[in-house]
Image (cartoon, grey):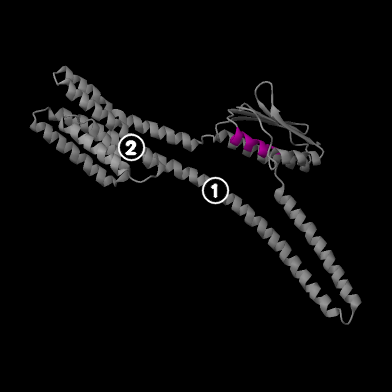
Amino acid sequence: MRRATKLDKLRWLIVYSTDGIMLAALIGYYDLYLRWQLGVPLPVVVTGAVLLLIFNVLATRPHRIAIRGGARPTAILAVAGIIGLVLAVTGLMWAVPAWLAALAPFVRRRTVVVASVLTVVAFNLYMGLLGANVLGLLLVQTLLTVISVGGMLANLWLWGVAKEAYEGQEARSRLAVSEERLRFAHDLNSLLGQSLLDIATRTENASHALPADARAAADEMFAVRDLARQSLREVRSVVQSYRAVDLDEMLASVRAVLEAADVRCTVQAETGSLPPEARTLLATVVREGATNVLKHSNAERCTITIEDGVLEMSNDGLSGPVGEHAPNGLAGLAQRVRAAGGTLEAAPTPEGRYLLRAAVPA
């Protein structure tokens, strides 16, 4: 099951807070109760309550669709608008502000402002003709309309800002990966380009010298062989430096990533005396362990310790039986650790935690 990100949690907060704004129309039930107490027939009150319930259910859908980026739900808005109009004709204006708020994500702001003013004016003129206290109704309806429409627009604006920020972080991460790949490609191009040019030149020289001086041609081919071996060593050196991972940087990065995913991470590491090969290997284990915590557990706490070349990484997110490790995951990593003279184990503990333990020559 995918772990909820901070963006997911913010979306839930915005959706549920908007539900609270839309459910202000629930005041209409109390209004219906008072009307029943004043002698309005029960069937009329029940019909009004049913219509208001249908409206409340419909009103919780549009902002969810807007947050998902869906198309305007014309049918839902039309049915909710008709119900709101019917209730308003009977003097129940509580659904009108909620309908305007539901409409707000799908029209221009100017349109929703004009519609809000027109509904407030029209409803109060209508109630004035019926002899109602227009001043009180005007104040209440205006306040509810401002809260409902303003709250909806504010929540949608907040969601847009949060989504842009999250997408910006992802874009920066992808850009960093692309820049690293470009750097690696540039290094290889610079290295191999010159080497291949030298090899091509000496091979051509050998082909010209071969008919007249076989010894000179052989010397050129020996030089080509030496160039090829040198190029191979240089390529291996570049690839090795590209694959090398700094352990301290990896620990800091993993801690930041886990904390961002609401996993409290504690790190206690003594890495100063470790040789470069051991540091790179342990950094790879830490990265793989953090990936497993994020993808395959529901951990809330994670502890990472490194002492005398022994890495222990444990978390409290064990939620079921543990299967075999994937060949390209911990199983493949265990082979690399064993090839370097170390050991790697990953299993649940009696305390209900999951422990990843790697020991490398220090």
Q: Residue at x 91, y 76 (%)?
A: 215
Q: Which residues are magenta?
A: 285-296
Asked if disc 1 and disc 2 are in contact, CB closer than 8 Å, the reply is no
Instruction: Say which quadrant the C terminus sits in.
Output: top right
Q: Position of residue 350 (x, y in %)?
A: 69, 21
- The residue closer to the viewer here, 58 or 171, is 58
Element under disc 2:
helix
Mark 1 Cα-neighbour bin, 10 Å: few <14, some 14–19, many ≥20: few
Q: Residue at x 67, y 21 (%)?
A: 351
Q: Which mark is residue 81?
A: none
50 in relation to 211, above or below:
above
Q: Is residue 118 magenta?
A: no
Q: Residue at x 80, y 57 (%)?
A: 233
Q: Which residue is mark 2?
A: 152
The answer to which of marks 1 and 2 sits earlier in the sequence is 2
Q: Which quadrant of the figure has residue 125? A: top left
How far is disc 1 from disc 2 in space, using C-alphas? 30 Å
Left or right placement of residue 349 versus residue 47 in this view? right
179 in relation to 78, above or below:
below
Q: Position of residue 123 (x, y in %)?
A: 16, 35
Q: Amino acid at mark 2?
A: Met
Q: Residue at x 78, y 69 (%)?
A: 199
Q: Position of residue 300 (x, y in %)?
A: 58, 28
Q: Is residue 292 magenta?
A: yes
> Which label lies toward us, 1 or 2?
2
Element under disc 1:
helix
Q: Which residue is mark 1?
A: 172
